[in-house]
Image (tube, rainbow, N blue to C red):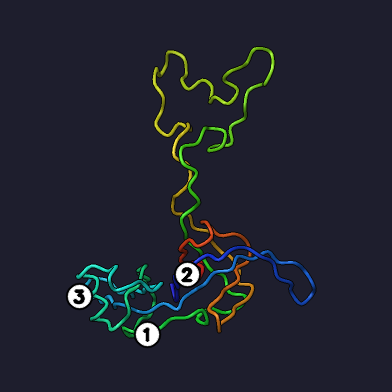
């Protein structure tokens, strides 16, 4: 990984390219992110940078975290993430990373938390087909149907697709193209959809080369 930012999903819209073609994009408020800590091989066993996004009141921060931010001389941040970069030699604690570290046309990977749907049935969760609505099928039109396999193996295998908690999990969408960057307002327009609801926290990093 060469670079990365924490951002907030603003929502979806559309823009037009030079040929007048419509491009659906997701707008992300990417940064500014402050570097709050440098992880080194000597102290931590690996090299990385810790960055913070989103200001928070000092009264909302506990004493250990307040000391952490005071040591870095950075205002308290709501979200902290680590990025293992290829080269951290030029980065110092207190540096501010903004949207302009990326370029238009660059491919990025976006990670976020998908929308939560609570406890959902098998049709909504796994796209099962429902039963016929006529000829005495009811009242179990939306049931999952048979689970077992007769007398052998006389049990239900682990991983069987059933009703349960749907959504609210970490999802990464790879190789999305940056359609436009508004460096002045720290906005990045990414082609296509990204995980999570409006206002959700996302992590943008340069695409991993296969």
> Where does residue 181 sit, x and y in percent of width and height?
59, 78
Q: What residue is drawn where x is 41% and y is 77%?
A: 33
Q: CA distance from mark 2 to mark 1?
A: 17 Å
> Circle 3 is placed at which residue position?
43
The mark that comes first in sequence, 3 or 2, is: 2
Relative to 24, 121 lies left or right: left
Asked if residue 147 shows in the view, the reply is yes
Neighbour tally class for label 3: few under 14, some 14-19, many 20 plus, Cα within 10 Å: few
Asked if residue 81 shows in the view, the reply is no
The mark that comes first in sequence, 1 or 3, is: 3
Q: Quadrant of residue 57?
A: bottom left
Q: What residue is drawn where x is 41% and y is 72%?
A: 54
Q: What residue is drawn where x is 48% and y is 22%?
A: 147
> Where does residue 182 sit, x and y in percent of width and height?
59, 80
Q: Nearer the viewer, mark 3 or mark 2?
A: 2
Residue 7 — which label?
Answer: 2
Residue 95 — which label?
Answer: 1
Neighbour tally class for label 2: few under 14, some 14-19, many 20 plus, Cα within 10 Å: many
Q: CA distance from mark 3 to mark 2?
A: 28 Å
């Amino acid at each position: 990984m060469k670079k990365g930012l924490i951002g907030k999903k603003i929502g979806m819209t559309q823009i037009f390219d030079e040929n007048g073609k419509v491009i659906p994009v997701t707008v992300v408020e990417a940064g500014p992110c402050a570097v709050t800590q440098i992880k080194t091989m000597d102290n931590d066993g690996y090299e990385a940078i810790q960055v913070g996004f989103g200001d928070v009141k000092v009264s909302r921060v506990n004493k250990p975290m307040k000391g952490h931010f005071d040591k870095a001389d950075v205002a308290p941040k709501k979200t902290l993430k680590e990025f293992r970069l290829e080269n951290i030699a030029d980065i110092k604690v207190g540096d501010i990373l903004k949207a302009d570290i990326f370029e238009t046309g660059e491919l990025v990977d976006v990670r976020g938390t998908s929308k939560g749907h609570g406890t959902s049935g098998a049709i909504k969760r796994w796209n099962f087909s429902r039963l016929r609505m006529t000829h005495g099928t009811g009242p179990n039109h939306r049931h999952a149907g048979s689970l077992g396999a007769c007398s052998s193996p006389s049990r239900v295998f682990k991983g069987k697709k059933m009703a349960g908690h749907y959504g609210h999990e970490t999802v990464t969408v790879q190789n999305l193209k940056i359609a436009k960057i508004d460096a002045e307002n720290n906005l990045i327009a990414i082609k296509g959809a990204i995980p999570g609801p409006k206002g959700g926290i996302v992590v943008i990093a340069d695409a991993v080369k296969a």
